[in-house]
Image (spheres, rainbow, N blue to C red):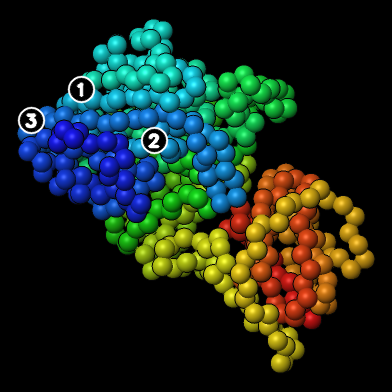
Amino acid sequence: MDPRRLHSLTRVFAGGLSRRALVGGALGSGGVALSAVGLVQATAEVAPVVDSGEPQLHEFDLTASEFDWAISGDTTVRAWGYNGQVPGPELRVREGDQVRVTLRNTLPVPTTIHWHGVNVPPAMDGPAGLNQAPVAPGDEFVYEFTARPSGTRWYHSHTDPALQIALGLYGSFIIEPRQPLRTFDREYTYILQEWDLELTPDVALGKAAAGVGDRMMRGGELGGDLFLFNGHAHDGITPIRLATGERVLIRLINAGNMPHAFHTHGHSFKLVATDGNQVPLGMEWVKDTVLIGPSERYDLELVGDNPGVWMVHCHMEHHMANGMMTFIVYDGSTPTGPAAAFFDAATGTFATGHEHMVAEAASAPGMSMPAPVAAPAPAAPVAAAAAPANTVEIAMVDDRFDPNNVTVPAGTTVAWVNKGRDWHSVAAFDGSFESGRLAPGESFSWQLDKPGVYQYLCKHHALQGMTGQITVT
């Protein structure tokens, strides 16, 4: 292989993309930079990138294809994306460097790439028909341009973009400045997008009719069912990790059709760049909520001066309830509320599996506790029906169980019925039962035969307080 060339998945870091590693690795092979590419939810220590002399050549491969994509633990969709992921890999270069990207199209439809916010020659800009012929299925096209200006940029399809971007054909493109105005200890990129569950590749290809919701609401900005950070919802989103005193750069990119109100609890932040363009020192706005419109970018500087575990979410509450929420987690911190029971201190995330034992009984001495068991496969939800006489019903109203604390005799069947507007789920801390995703109107039942205290949660909304407890006597 040509030593100058680095394919776009060569340096993917599951735990993060280190700018220090980028600097060290990029200049260590014959003076020619090998570009690092990482998942956009990556984070790591960040060293300042300074002018290193002559511009370098960076080469990337992006393959557009169709694949299954796990939005969260219980929701997998059919997507179109780059290199088997949504968003596509994050591409990083320095201002003034030469960029060569080979697009390989394995989709059943033509496609192109637009370099959003990058001042490229017209033939490299990507709008199909205006600036280039669309890249046919099975063909490839090489984009070549100089990386300028510096800042948070992004790339996306510009062939049938109303469908192709919505199905996942987008990614971040970071152009580092030669002379950085600010430096940071850690860095995160969050790309915001809505996901329309009725928009599938078959619908995009004309092989299936649009769903009922899309026919009524005309799709697009009104068709979103889930709201994503970096292609994920709820527990699939990587939180912001930091230590006290660290300065963190958060890059926001809105790849969707709707505005979103990005809000941090416990912290204000400075707006240090807009659409990738640096705000002069001393002229930053200090905010705790920023409204980001479609295609906009904001760079936020957050200082770790308030240790704890804090929410980060879209303050359009329906967007938060349906996916757009993660956390600020300080090293060594745990939640101060009930969520501490399912917080994993080692990873700084919230357990969604079955690592927990049942709670100790708070009643009769000598009560035997049920032994932990392997988690069963999620049961198939069923439409809600009338409960038999030995069944206790618990309503799932948005963000709460009603009632959330019940006592029942052994042998009782508990039926959870989703009477809210959003998806919910039921999962026992000890793994003894789990429902999988429950749509409005669906229910899940489980017979509790062994005495003990069973704690459970909604895996979608536990951090908004949706937890419960059943005492079996």
Q: Nearer the viewer, residue 358 or 30?
A: 30
Disc 2 and disc 3: Cα gap in Å?
30 Å
Q: Residue furthest bottom?
A: 366
Kindly identify the amino acid type of the residue bearing the numbered disc 1. Thr
Residue 132 lies, in percent from the top left, at 35, 10
The tag on residue 54 is 3
In the rendered view, would you say 190 is above or below 453? above
Kindly identify the amino acid type of the residue bearing the numbered disc 2. Asn
Residue 124 in view, yes or no: yes
State which tag comes first along the sequence, 1 or 2: 2
State which tag comes first along the sequence, 1 or 3: 3
Residue hosting label 2:
83
Q: Nearer the viewer, residue 219 or 339?
A: 219
Query: Looking at the image, which residue is at 61% across and 53% down?
Result: 460
Residue 24 lies, in percent from the top left, at 14, 47
Q: Residue furthest right?
A: 389
Query: Looking at the image, which residue is at 41% across and 7% down?
Result: 129
Residue 46 lies, in percent from the top left, at 24, 49
